[in-house]
Image: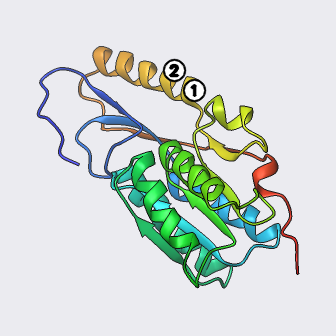
């Protein structure tokens, strides 16, 4: 990610590299993805696939996935695609038709989650009986579909308030050191990650 050289007080929200020149408020993406993987493993899933976009947050979530899979003693298998529902539909459709079809898929954003759900339904798979799904962003649709989709909910209101606080402090004291606030996500468990049914 390339940062613009801005001459006025700026706070980056959601995306900011560790070496950023600006104050920032970000989610602990790696830990949040690790929580999703640990939840799926506790539900009995072992072949947990990952579907990731190309953004800096997607890279952080991918790294969290790899670390969590290693910590659980599981073999990672993931795909990187353009961050669109259409790309997810194509990639997951091929994946589900392959010999190494995963038992569960975690995605790095809601568009990929939407595409993965569409691909699973097109393939005639039942959620979660045939495939468990989980991802990021507690958008309204994730609670309206049946079953509801397990997601990481970002504390967007807290992040906004923290960003405003940082900005006001920066305006008052321009010489303060650069600050980076890391927020914690919340795993919202729904029916898409029900316990795995053993054959």
- The answer to whether 73 appears left or right of 166 in the picture is right
Q: Which residue is mark 1?
A: 158
- The answer to whether 106 appears left or right of 160 in the picture is right
How far from the left and from the top, in percent, is residue 143?
73, 34
Q: Are marks 1 and 2 in contact (CB under 8 Å)?
A: yes
- Image quadrant in which you'd find residue 25: top left
- Image quadrant in which you'd find residue 22: top left
Above/below status of 45 relative to 163: below
- The answer to whether 186 appears left or right of 111 in the picture is right
Nearer to the camera, 147 or 7: 147
Secondary structure, mark 1, is: helix
How far from the left and from the top, in percent, is residue 159?
51, 29
Above/below status of 101 relative to 80: below
- The answer to whether 82 appears left or right of 164 in the picture is left
Residue at image position (82%, 73%) is 44
Quadrant of image for the C terminus: bottom right
3D distance between C-alphas at marks 1 and 2 = 5 Å
Secondary structure, mark 2, is: helix
Q: Which residue is mark 2?
A: 161
Nearer to the camera, 137 or 68: 137
Nearer to the camera, 2 or 116: 116
């Amino acid at each position: 990610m390339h940062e613009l050289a801005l001459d006025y007080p700026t706070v980056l929200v959601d995306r900011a590299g560790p070496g950023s020149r600006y104050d920032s408020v970000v989610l602990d993406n790696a830990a949040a993805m690790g929580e999703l993987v640990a939840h799926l493993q506790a539900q009995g899933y072992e072949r947990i696939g990952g579907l990731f976009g190309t953004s800096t947050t997607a890279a952080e979530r991918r790294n969290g996935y790899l670390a969590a899979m290693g910590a659980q003693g599981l073999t990672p298998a993931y795909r990187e695609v353009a961050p669109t529902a259409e790309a997810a539909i194509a990639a997951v459709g091929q994946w589900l038709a392959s010999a190494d079809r995963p038992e569960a898929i975690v995605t790095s954003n809601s568009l990929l989650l939407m595409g993965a759900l569409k691909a699973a339904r097109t393939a005639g798979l039942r959620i979660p009986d045939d495939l468990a799904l989980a991802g990021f962003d507690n958008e309204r649709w994730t609670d309206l579909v049946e079953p509801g989709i397990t997601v990481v909910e970002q504390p967007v209101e807290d992040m906004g308030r923290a960003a405003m606080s940082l900005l006001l402090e920066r305006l008052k004291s321009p010489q303060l050191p650069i600050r980076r606030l890391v927020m914690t996500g919340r795993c919202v468990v729904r029916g898409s990650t029900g316990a795995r049914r053993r054959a």
